[in-house]
Amino acid sequence: MESRFKRVLLKLSGEALAGGRGFGIDPPVISSIAGEIAEVHAAGVQIGIVIGGGNFLRGATTQGVSRVAGDTMGMLATVINSIALKEYLNKHNCPSRVLNAVNIDRAGGYFTPSGAVECMQNGEVVIIAGGTGNPFFTTDTAAALRCAEIGAEVLLKATKVDGIYDSDPVKNPSAVRFESISHGEALAKGLKVMDATAFSFCQENSIPIIIFKLLEKGNLRRCLEGQAVGSIIKTGE
């Protein structure tokens, strides 16, 4: 493959790892995702990854505990998912490393932007766990922040649908899909691309976002090759 990008930040939802189970980690699903990542890594693309924790719990919605405690629990869920993905990448002979925004002994190294870049330059996929390391911020925001910190050229957000629509394509068969749109237009149309903090950060820092369907074999590779498999948001379109 011939990628349009040298370094990317891939955002995965925790729910994606659960597959049809709805909870936890589905081995065939995470193995398939790891295989897709290994394929593009083998072609020379430097990859940073941020994973959510919603397949175990969503911090902000955890009942019976404070928001700070709940979000901290959510950060730990992202660490679980990151360690699991690392194991499956290893099975695909793809060297990888977990770097945490929260300091957890034996669960990976501590994240610094320079450390992450060094790992990628040395041929490792870097999985950045622990969100931003602070409560009140989603893993979408963590992905946008890490994208800027590691100097990635694009934020790839893997979803259940094949791009951005003006309404939910599952509920509305007539929903219109956007192949390309600017950050400003997406805001003006009220499109729910990611949470507002994350999206504003991408807009302010001119970070392009590609939304694509994850669980379709070869889509990650096609996305990096520039094929029309998703929707792209970028400045000045």
Image: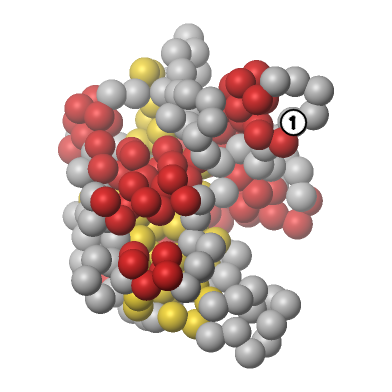
Residue 57 location (% of width, % of height): 70, 35
Q: Position of residue 94 (x, y in %)?
A: 38, 43
Would residue 143 appear left or right of 19 to someone viewing this image?
Answer: left
Q: Which residue is the extreme one toward the front?
A: 188
Query: For residue 29, which quarter of the picture?
Result: bottom right
Q: Is residue 213 above or below residue 22?
A: below
Q: Please tell me which residue is depicted at 25% across the width and 37% down the height of the picture.
A: 149
The residue at which mark 1 appears reads as: 62
| The N terminus - image quarter | bottom left
Residue at 50% in and 82% down: 177
Residue sitting at x 48%, y 9%: 105
> In the image shown, does 10 or 207 lie closer to the viewer?
207
Q: How is the image coloured?
A: secondary structure
The amino acid type found where label 1 is placed reads: Thr
Res. 66 image quadrant: top right
2 lies above or below 80: below
Q: Nearer the viewer, residue 24 or 41?
A: 24
Residue drawn 32% across the image and 71% down it: 182
**Label 1 crowd (10 A; few <14 / some 14-19 / many >=20):** some
Q: Examine the rendering and report whether any part of residue 214 can be seen.
A: no
Q: Considering depth in this image, is 206 or 124 the residue closer to the camera?
A: 206
